[in-house]
Image: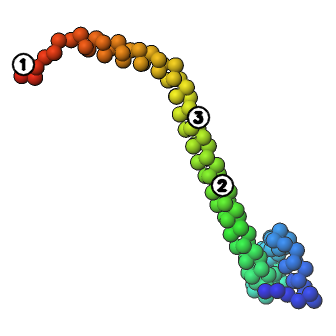
Amino acid sequence: GCYHESSEWYSITHSGLDAMMQAFISNMEEFLSLPAALQNANASSYEYTWRVAANDLYDGLGTAGDLFVDTTLKALGHLKQLHTILLLCTLAIMGVLVLLLLIPFKRQLLEESVRLAGLLSLLPQVSRGAW
C-alpha cells in the first residue's frame, strides 16, 4: 500500500520499479546469506519482501507486464495494417504491370482474330445431320 512520508518504506516505493527490484534482490541475497537458523519471517532482511515486494513491487511488475503486452499488441496491429496496405499496393502494381505488358499485343490480337475469322468463313458449311 501507500506508505506515509515518515515510513522507512516511503522512499523506496516512490523510486520506481527498478529501485524496488534492486532492493528486493539485495534483501534476498542478504537473507540467503544468513545462517539457516536465522532465515525466518522475523529476519530484518525479509521484512522488505512481505512489506514492499509482496504488494507494491508485485503490483508494479503486473502493471508493467500489462503495459508491455498492450504496447506490443498495438505495435503488431499497426504492423498488420501496414502489411495489408503493402500487399494491396503490390497487387495493384502487379495488375498495372500485367496490363502494360499486354497492351502492345492488343493490335496483334485484333489482327489475328480478323485473319482467323476470314479463314473460318472459307470453310464449307456442314449441316448438322451429316455428323
* Outermost left residue: 129
Nearer the camera: disc 2 or disc 3: 3
Q: Is residue 130 above or below residue 44?
A: above
The quadrant of the picture occupied by the N terminus is bottom right
* C-alpha span from label 2 to label 3: 22 Å
How many residues crowd mark 3 within 10 Å: few (<14), some (14–19), many (20+)? few
Q: Nearer the viewer, residue 114 or 11?
A: 114
**Residue position for label 1:** 130
Q: Which mark is residue 93?
A: 3
Q: Nearer the viewer, residue 67 or 74?
A: 74
Sequence-wise first label, 1 or 2: 2
Q: Locate residue 38 relative to residue 123 in the image: left or right.
A: right
**Residue position for label 2:** 78
Q: Which mark is residue 118?
A: none
* C-alpha span from label 3 to label 1: 53 Å
Amino acid carrying label 3: it is Ile
Q: Tell me whether circle 3 and circle 1 mark residues in contact (CB < 8 Å).
A: no
Q: Secondary structure at mark 3?
A: helix
Q: Quadrant of residue 45?
A: bottom right
Amino acid carrying label 1: it is Ala
For the question of whether residue 49 can be seen, the reply is no
For the question of whether residue 69 can be seen, the reply is yes
How many residues crowd mark 1 within 10 Å: few (<14), some (14–19), many (20+)? few
Amino acid carrying label 2: it is His
Q: Tell me whether circle 1 and circle 2 mark residues in contact (CB < 8 Å).
A: no
Sequence-wise first label, 2 or 3: 2
* C-alpha span from label 1 to label 2: 69 Å
Residue displayed at 24% across by 10% down: 122
State the count of labels.
3
Q: Secondary structure at mark 2?
A: helix
Q: Locate residue 113 relative to residue 81 in the image: left or right.
A: left
